[in-house]
Structure formats: structure tokens, C-alpha cells
Image (cartoon, rainbow, N blue to C red):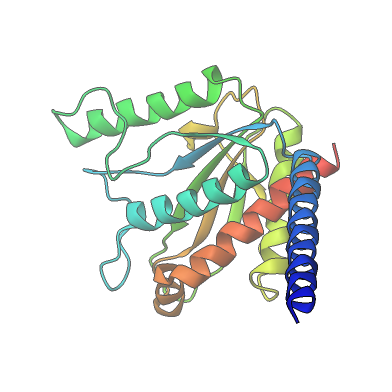
Amino acid sequence: MQIFKSLSIYVFCIFIIVISLFINISNVSFSKETLATPLAGRVVVLDAGHGAPDGGAVGISGTLEKDINLSITKKLQSLFEKTGTYVILTRSDDNNISPGKSGRIRDIKRGDLKARKDYRDNSGADLFLSIHMNKFPEEKYKGAQVFYSKSPDKSKILGETIQNSLKENLDINNNRIAKCADNSIYILKDSQIPSVIVECGFLSNYEEEKLLKDDNYQEKIAWAIYLGVLQYFENL
């Protein structure tokens, strides 16, 4: 009986050791796979548009654009960092990043945009990605849309790849196309790196505003954008 108990304990210990080794090997394999992704070692600037005192667009029910922008940006940050990407956030809290915090709102906004542009130009990043919400006087319009900088040429590829991913992974009925930004979009002017703005939806559309406030839907938006960026780097 004693021999049987000793043998049982021995077998159990061997079983635990084998399971532990299997788990460790699986973790190592996962780590190697993560490091091997096209995003590993890349540097990405994530820009959550607006920030107090600038709330951005206001939805039908009073939703502030700045809050949704930051929430989606942080979800994107988590996805990128899990695959070895170095993420630079232009803002990580509710506030804008203008060096001047007092004075006219117009001056604060101007300083804020310049600071974001400095992040884009001086961080050594592989790309710049700005998150925003759209708004229009008519409530019927909906759907995510990407705007890309005129330069460099890879911005167009990045913008179209993200737009396609938003259709495939977020809303198959979204027939919007990625568009080249004109000079009125300051944050995308004179860019030396691939740069895009993702307008994630319309706060002026009642149904879409409800979706944009939903945490699960925000996760889907972040995932679709992430997959678009991943595909962009895979195809370089």
C-alpha cells in the first residue's frame, strides 16, 4: 500500500513537471511569434484628437468627441504594445497639449495642433495616426472614413488599407473611401512620414453616436484600425 502511494505521488509529480514544461514552451513560442510580427520594433504616434478645454464635436445627446477619441486611442495603444510596437501618445489624459494653457481658445487650439505636429515630425516614428469623430448638419450620414496626408506616397497606401479594414472588420456596408486631405487639415500638412486621420463615425447620427459610446464597439474600431496597420506593414 505504501509503495502504491509513493508511486502515485511520483507519477503525479512527473505529470506536473510535464505540464509546466509544456506551458513554458508555449509561452516561449508565443513570445517568438510576437517578436516576429511586422509591428515588432515599429514606432507609432497615436494622437487622440482634441482635449480640454476643446471638447471637439458634440453629439446629439451631448457626447464629447475628445472622450471617445482618447478611449479608442488607449485601446489601440494596448493592441500595438502587445505586439512589440513602441507607442507614443500625444495625450494620455483629458487635457490638450498646448504649451499655453490660458488665453483665447483659438490660441490654445493653435498651440495644441502645433505640438501634435511636432510629435509627428520629431519622434522618429514610422507613422502618425490621429483618432477623431465626424459630424455633419444632416443626421443621415454615418460610417468611418480615413483621410491621409499628401506626402509621402505611402500615406495613401496606409489610408486605403485602414479604410478597407474598417469595411471588412467593422461595417461591411460602409462604402466610404479613403481621401487625400487638403491643406485645411493642419495636422496632416507637410508630413515626412505616413500620416492619417481616422474619423471613426458620425456623432451627428443618433444610432452611430450610441455605438461610438459603447465600449465593445470601440474595441471593434480599435481592432479594425490595428489590423489595417498590421496589413500595411506586412505589405511593405
Compare residues 170 and 205 and report the one nearer the observer. Answer: 170
Name which residue lies at 33% across and 30% down: 112
Q: With respect to residue 139, does 121 lie above or below?
A: above
Q: How many marks?
A: 0
Q: With respect to residue 128, does 190 lie above or below?
A: above
The reply to whether residue 37 is in sight is no
In the displayed orientation, state which residue is furthest to the top: 122
In the displayed orientation, state which residue is furthest to the front: 2
Instruction: Point out the image quarter for the N terminus.
Output: bottom right
Compare residues 88 and 130 and report the one nearer the observer. Answer: 88
Question: In the image, 178: left or right of 33?
Answer: left
Name which residue lies at 74% across and 63% down: 13
State which quadrant residue 44 falls in: top right
Instruction: Point out the image quarter for the C terminus.
Output: top right
- Point out residue 14 in the picture as x, y percentages from the top left corner: 79, 62
Compare residues 204 and 89 and report the one nearer the observer. Answer: 89
Question: In the image, 12: left or right of 71?
Answer: right
- Point out residue 232 in the picture as x, y percentages from the top left corner: 77, 44
State which quadrant residue 65 falls in: bottom left
The reply to whether residue 114 is in sight is yes
- Point out residue 200 in the picture as x, y percentages from the top left corner: 52, 59
Name which residue lies at 32% across and 31% down: 97
Question: In the image, 53: left or right of 84?
Answer: left
In the displayed orientation, state which residue is furthest to the left: 103
- Point out residue 49 in the picture as x, y percentages from the top left corner: 41, 44
Name which residue lies at 59% across and 42% down: 81
Question: In the image, 132: left or right of 165?
Answer: left
